[in-house]
Image (cartoon, grey):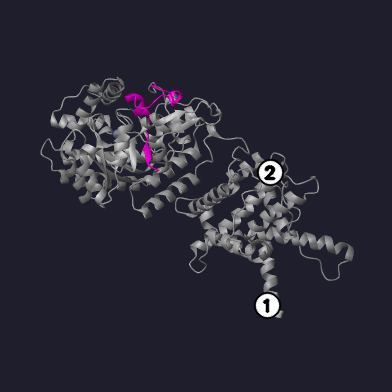
């Protein structure tokens, strides 16, 4: 990895970068309270807390969790659970959770909690689940009113050290389809394997309720094996101790560019990776509990625990091919958020747009949602990333840096992004100029962009093709195609889209080359030369012109860059537009020469008159090219 410049690690500060859109699958409701809310709820029921203002209480939670003392760590949950013994308190905290997660860039979360821990004041298990459901729904509505889309579902946890896990499983089944999407076992892992709760797990399995289990956090490989075999877990809460099942092959050549080189997965680790069982990895939490091995110790006997973000093996897990589901675990106790976990990964591993996009899409695949909703979530993620800058500045790769990836997948992603950008620009949250365009209003741009491509290829003062310019001008032509396709998609009478344009073209190409494709399914060629990632430029009035000036410093004169091959009227219109923009005098409007003007004068006088007509066209807001084309068409229809 390239070294990256340090970034502020604090969250919630004005200088912190905005979070990358994410999916958050391991988050405890009783570990996610706002300190101020803990204070207010405690005051209401007379519960004593170790601090009396939000800031010092927040610090107390972090320090207690950081102390390395299990007693102090567990004490933190004593307080949060103590203040969550009423339906109102649960509802409030659930609502606040949604709002905090939305502000944290989360598009979809599964928040987990243990209903059995909230019955001390007589609250009924059903009521408790309904209270959380109400709070989540209220939070979703409030977020939507602020223009933020988020969905949050519940995972119900049974406590390993308590009886009654079957009742929690039954509760989850009863509320399935009403906000509860899965089952978990929480609490002390060591000494309480999933097999202790086989009846609860059997009921989940019998009804195909998805299960994620805390395993491989506080106990090792046998706990993980039990979670997967007896628990049929589709995801593991942390699972980081799975790295104890990885060994180093001393014979294998070490590749410094590949952290996974030389490492060999055992039966359990390999099986979990290959079965696509997700690992809900929470780096900040793992550093506090000492759950994860130091990355440099992986493959060695008796590894030391990772204590700093750089020592955490999250990047290695990803390099080994595991489905990593980045999560915060306990926002309050770890003083963390998705944004903070992302910042640490950016700082220590250089992760940026591509990595966080992939993590979010992996999260969407592992969401315990119906298949259709998972795909809708994935589409939202793709759309959210399409309108973000191509890479965080600190992770931008050099031109051609992505060339190792085959061209077809890159093209699919890039073209998909363009289609999404166009959809966004035409939407209510988009750009008024783009939204107002029609097929007809775009015609002159299509002509202009086409002439600019010709100019990039044929410009007489150049020897050879200017590749960077050609790439950009081709992009502008492609934009026209996608723009028209988007308009057609929005027009019921037209009803085709960008995919239809490409599919039609593909079919035609294959049809026209029977000697190549006969008896062969169409396949995208993987051996085309790679191209640099094309930057996308958006039309934005004055800002656009300014950008253009900055990008093309060689265009200094007001008329530079007007393609000489433009049709004369279009060229006149463009020239006059440039002159007007910088305040130059426009030519006078003159009459055309009479029929008996001398041949020598006639051409000049007629030219002046036509130029004057172009001035008049500007005054009238009429495109003279289009006006003349239309007049010619009318004439031809009339007399032809
Ligand atoms: Zn957890």
Say whether residue 297 is left or right of residue 133. Answer: right
Q: Quadrant of residue 167?
A: top left
Ligand 1 located in image quadrant = top left
Quadrant location of the N terminus?
A: top right
Q: What is the crowding at mark 1: few (fewer than 14 residues within 10 Å), some, or many (at least 20)?
A: few
Q: Where's residue 190, x and y in %?
A: 26, 29
Residue that mark 1 sits on: 637
Q: Secondary structure at mark 2?
A: helix
| Residue shown at 58% from the left, 64% from the top | 504
Q: Which residues are magenta?
A: 276-303
- Tell me if residue 12 can be seen: no
Q: Is residue 294 magenta?
A: yes
Q: Is ligand 1 within 8 Å of the beta carbon of the residue shown at mark 1?
A: no
Q: Quadrant of residue 10?
A: top left
Q: Is residue 257 magenta?
A: no
Q: What is the crowding at mark 2: few (fewer than 14 residues within 10 Å), some, or many (at least 20)?
A: few
Q: Nearer the viewer, residue 455 or 319?
A: 319
- Tell me if residue 557 can be seen: yes
Quadrant location of the C terminus?
A: bottom right
Q: CA distance from mark 2 to mark 1?
A: 44 Å
Say whether residue 282 is left or right of residue 28. Answer: right
| Residue shown at 19% from the left, 47% from the top | 170
Residue that mark 2 sits on: 468
Q: Nearer the viewer, residue 587 or 96?
A: 96
Say which label, 2 or 1, has the lower sequence index.
2
Q: Quadrant of residue 158?
A: top left
Q: Nearer the viewer, residue 521 or 556?
A: 521
Say whether residue 284 is left or right of residue 315. Answer: left
Q: Secondary structure at mark 1?
A: helix
Q: Where's residue 365, x and y in %?
A: 40, 47
Q: How many numbered markers are drawn? A: 2
């Amino acid at each position: 990895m390239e070294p990256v410049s340090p970034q502020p690690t604090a969250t919630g500060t004005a200088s912190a970068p905005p979070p990358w859109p994410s999916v958050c699958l391991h988050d405890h409701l009783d570990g996610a309270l706002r300190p101020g809310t803990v204070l207010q709820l405690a005051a209401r029921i007379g519960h004593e807390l170790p601090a009396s203002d939000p800031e010092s209480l927040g610090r107390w939670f972090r320090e207690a969790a950081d102390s390395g003392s299990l007693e102090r760590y567990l004490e933190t949950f004593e307080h949060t659970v103590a203040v969550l013994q009423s339906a109102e308190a649960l509802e409030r905290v659930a609502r606040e959770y949604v709002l905090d997660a939305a502000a944290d860039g989360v598009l979809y979360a599964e928040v987990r909690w243990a209903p059995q821990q909230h019955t001390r004041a007589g609250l009924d298990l059903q009521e408790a689940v309904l209270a959380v459901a109400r709070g989540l729904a209220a939070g979703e509505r409030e977020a939507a009113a602020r223009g933020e889309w988020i969905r949050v579902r519940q995972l119900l946890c049974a406590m390993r050290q308590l009886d009654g896990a079957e009742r929690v499983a039954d509760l989850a089944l009863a509320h399935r389809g009403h906000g509860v999407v899965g089952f978990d076992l929480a609490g002390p892992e060591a000494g309480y394997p999933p097999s202790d709760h086989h009846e609860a797990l059997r009921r989940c399995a019998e009804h195909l309720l998805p299960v994620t289990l805390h395993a491989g956090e506080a106990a090792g490989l046998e706990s993980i094996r039990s979670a997967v075999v007896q628990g049929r877990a589709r995801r593991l809460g942390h699972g980081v101790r799975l790295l104890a099942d990885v060994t180093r092959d001393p014979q294998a050549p070490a590749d410094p560019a590949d952290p996974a080189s030389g490492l060999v997965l055992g039966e359990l680790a390999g099986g979990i990776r290959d079965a696509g069982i997700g690992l809900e990895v929470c780096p900040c939490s793992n550093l506090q509990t000492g759950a994860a091995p130091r990355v440099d110790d992986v493959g060695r006997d008796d590894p030391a625990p990772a204590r700093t973000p750089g020592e955490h093996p999250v990047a290695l897990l990803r390099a080994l091919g595991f489905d990593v589901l980045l999560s915060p675990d306990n926002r309050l106790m770890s003083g963390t958020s998705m944004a903070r976990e992302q910042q640490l990964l950016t700082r220590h591993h250089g992760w940026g747009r591509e990595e966080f996009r992939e993590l979010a899409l992996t999260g969407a695949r592992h969401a315990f949602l119906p298949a259709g909703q998972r795909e809708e979530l994935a589409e939202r993620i793709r759309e959210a990333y399409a309108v973000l800058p191509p890479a965080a500045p600190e992770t931008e790769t050099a031109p051609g840096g992505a060339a190792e990836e085959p061209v077809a997948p890159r093209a699919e992603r890039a073209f998909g992004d363009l289609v999404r950008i166009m959809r966004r620009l035409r939407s209510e949250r988009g750009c008024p100029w783009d939204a107002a365009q029609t097929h007809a209003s775009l015609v002159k741009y299509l002509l202009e962009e086409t002439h600019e491509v010709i100019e990039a290829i044929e410009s007489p003062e150049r020897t050879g093709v200017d590749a960077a310019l050609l790439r950009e001008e081709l992009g502008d032509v492609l934009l026209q195609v996608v723009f028209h396709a988007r308009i057609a998609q929005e027009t019921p009478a037209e009803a085709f889209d960008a995919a239809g344009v490409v599919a039609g073209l593909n079919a035609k190409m294959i049809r026209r080359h029977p000697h190549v494709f006969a008896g062969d399914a169409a396949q995208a060629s993987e051996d085309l030369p790679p191209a640099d990632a094309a930057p996308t430029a958006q039309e934005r009035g004055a800002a656009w012109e300014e950008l253009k000036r900055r990008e093309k410093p060689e265009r200094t004169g007001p008329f530079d860059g007007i393609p000489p091959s433009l049709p004369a009227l279009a060229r006149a219109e463009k020239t006059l537009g440039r002159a007007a923009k910088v305040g130059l005098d426009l030519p006078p409007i003159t009459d055309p020469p009479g029929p008996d003007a001398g041949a020598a004068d006639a051409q000049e006088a007629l030219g002046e008159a036509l130029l004057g007509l172009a001035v008049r066209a500007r005054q009238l807001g009429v495109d003279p090219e289009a006006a003349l084309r239309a007049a010619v068409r009318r004439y031809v229809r009339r007399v032809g």
